[in-house]
Amino acid sequence: MGVFNKIRRNAILSKSLKVYVKYGLGEILIVIIGVFFALQINNWNDRRTENEVMKSYFSKMHDEINSTTQVIDYSSAYTKEYMIPQLRRGLKVMSTHQKDSLNEFKIALGELTEGESLTFYLPIIDEFINQGYLSKIDNEVLNRQFENLNYFRSQCKISNELSREYQIKLIKPYIGKHINYSEIAINQDYIQTGGTKTDLDKLLHDQELRNLMTFQLENLYKSTSNFTALSATLKRIDSNLIKINKSFD
């Protein structure tokens, strides 16, 4: 600044246009440099703030994914290891007409009233996307994973809707007409038994019931496949986000 002040004084004393121009350009240059540094500092502060926000989202999404996949995996495991095998055994009993296996058949009827219908939400992930933070990450693999996430979420929603529709329109009306529900309810702890005894032997030959059990089995296979894929996709997203999070350190 001392140099430019000296130039200014000399310009005033000499009344030289050339010196005045030199002085003016110098002051403009100082202003430009000052603005440049100010913008750089602001940009650095903005990036730092944004990075902190991103890291906070990464941490929250990790927790959300972990808790959600635990629920999905537990439900899928129960479906694969118990519900599906029980329905298959029930259908086998119907095919062979094994009257000595009526207890297994009754258990299968209880599973008929169940369905892999999960209601879950991903508010942190949805907020992260809606706030535009995903678009700030230049990672093609992550973008594809989020596209897969949207697809499997929609497929799981369809599976839930089909499961509810089966229960409301087909399975429960049939049970109401032909089966004493208190005899087949899975949780007997709060059920008061009584009423007309179900003719299980007659049900072994019922084609409508066989169709319902087959529909239920098919729906469980599809829904389990969708939920398993959803869980795997969430875990891949989490793994990728952990790597990306380290680049923000």
Image (cartoon, helix red, strand yellow):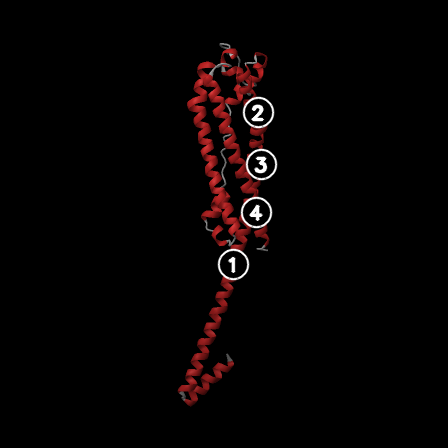
Q: Which mark is residue 59?
A: 4
Question: At label 1, which amino acid type do we have?
Answer: Arg
In this rendering, which labeled residue sits more in front, label 4 or label 3? 3
Front-lying residue, 183 or 89: 89
Q: Which residue is mark 1?
A: 47
Question: At label 4, which amino acid type do we have?
Answer: Ser
Above or below: residue 204 compared with residue 218: above
CA gap between label 4 and label 2 equals 38 Å
Q: Is residue 191 visible?
A: no
Count of numbered labels shown in the rendering: 4
CA gap between label 1 and label 2 equals 54 Å
**Mark 1–mark 2 CB contact (< 8 Å):** no
Q: Which residue is mark 2?
A: 85
In this rendering, which labeled residue sits more in front, label 3 or label 1? 3
Above or below: residue 242 compared with residue 181: below
Q: Secondary structure at mark 4?
A: helix
Question: At label 3, which amino acid type do we have?
Answer: Gln
CA gap between label 2 and label 3 equals 22 Å
In this rendering, which labeled residue sits more in front, label 1 or label 2? 2
Q: Which residue is mark 3?
A: 70
Residue 117 drawn at (x, y percent): 49, 30
Question: At label 2, which amino acid type do we have?
Answer: Pro
Residue 45 drawn at (x, y percent): 52, 60
Residue positioned most to the top: 196
Q: Secondary structure at mark 1?
A: helix
